[in-house]
Image (spheres, coloured by chain):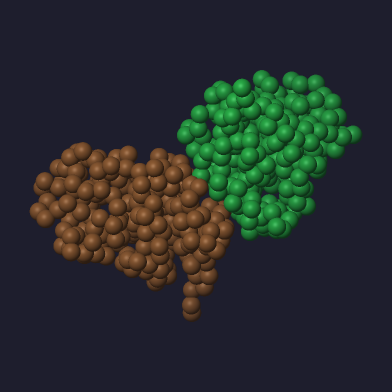
Chain colours: A brown, B green
Amino acid sequence: MMNVEKPSLEVCLSPALLHLYDTSDAVVVIIDIFRATSTITAALHNGARCVIPVASVAECIAIGEATPNSLTAGERDGKIAEGLQYGNSPLEYPPLFVNGKTLVLTTTNGTRLLHMVKDAAEILIGSFLNLHALCAHLLLQDKRVILGCASWKDRFNLEDTLFAGAVANELRYAFEIKDDSARAAMHLYECAKGKHLIEFLKDSSHYRRLAAYGLEEEMRYCVTPDLHPVVPYLKGREIIV
Amino acid sequence: MMNVEKPSLEVCLSPALLHLYDTSDAVVVIIDIFRATSTITAALHNGARCVIPVASVAECIAIGEATPNSLTAGERDGKIAEGLQYGNSPLEYPPLFVNGKTLVLTTTNGTRLLHMVKDAAEILIGSFLNLHALCAHLLLQDKRVILGCASWKDRFNLEDTLFAGAVANELRYAFEIKDDSARAAMHLYECAKGKHLIEFLKDSSHYRRLAAYGLEEEMRYCVTPDLHPVVPYLKGREIIV
């Protein structure tokens, strides 16, 4: 007999709300559209051996020194952090450059959320760049899903929620849309999808902050679906595909 | 010279995010549409002398006993709590019944948020029942506004956020819409306003929970704008108009 009970799908809007969710044995998707999870997805699809996400610049340098064939990367206030080699842009890691390398990446919001999740069945990386690959994987897993928005310093942000809405929209027939956050995210996606997503986001806090650093082109890249159809997941301390 | 800098408007989606907001000298609006703030607004417009919000049933009974001409009210799991006299419905307090009385009301989410705000310039009660009276008051105050959603056990809910969106939408030209939560709330209101708001909310967690107790009629009442055009505010331990 077929099991007709659908697994649930929930959206956690901020790391400060994560304690309200039961992540044990669930599939948790980490979402940090501008730009950690977009960059991780792009680098891995372009052939990076793995990405090691770390919280601090010092840790990034230390692991970089200890790891052969590695790159250290990370930004603070829109600039490459002192002591690191590269920035946090999906456009910085083309195949010829990143192939076979270990990318040691420090980001604040995305890394923090990733390290907060302890007991999940799987921790996956989600971005518009791998939207449909991710959704196909979630459909196959048939487990409870929690979409975790990295947000910005615990504050709700529009771009992560919009992506959660895009995923919930794709999965709505196969999963039980369980909480009002997921419903709200779907409504937001519904509002946005008539136009290019970047137009919808131009008024958002993060867009404005990054546009002030001249990063419009890469934000447009970050919200373009399916450019990098892989499903990165955390294994030990490494994110791999 | 006119001061052209607009005061900011922010939306706090859950009490668990309140620490991210600077409430000092701001006007904070407490929002608990289903049903604490709707009931408070209705009771005061119908002539109650004041509402005393309390966290526990025991406190409600004690204050009720010590207060002449008072009513004790509150629900747990959709029923009048044991030891109290009345429930938490805006329809329970018509003028002939409530006029001149002190309503000692225990609710969980709304009361908790109200007691968490310590240093605001004003703490106001918001509901669809007083939407435009509240907005007119906020326009006159010309101070920073934080719209605080009581949510449900710290979880984001659709009805409180929808109301925050309605307020932000009314005030958008006079205030700086400061955070992505306020933008998201406005988008949600934009999605909803083409139909009766209750239709938009029928899929929400709280609607389903209360509909199971047969409370559809009062939820419809709670989302009807401007039936009770007063602006309740906290003074000491009392909410008055």
- Farthest right residue in view: B96
B232 sits left or right of A236 in the view? right
Q: Position of residue A189 (x, y in %)?
A: 53, 59
Q: Looking at the image, which residue is at 75% across and 51% down?
A: B220
The N terminus of chain B, quarter of image = top right
Q: Quadrant of the C terminus of chain B?
A: top right
Count the marks: how many? Answer: 0
Q: Residue at x 75, y 41 (%)?
A: B129
Position of residue A91 measured from the top left corner of the image (x, y, whole percent)? 28, 57
Determine the image quadrant of residue B232.
top right
B114 lies above or below B132: above
Up/down of B96 relative to A13, above or below: above
Measured as percent of width and height from the top left, residue B10 is found at 55, 37
At 74% from the left and 26% from the top, the residue drawn is B240
Q: Looking at the image, can residue A83 be seen?
A: yes
Q: Can residue B52 be seen at all in this image of the molecule? A: no
Residue B58 position within the rendered picture, expressed as x and y whole percent measured from the top left: 65, 29
User: Measuring 48% from the left and 79% from the top, which residue is drawn there?
Assistant: A1
Residue in the foreground of this view, choosing between A177 and A228: A228
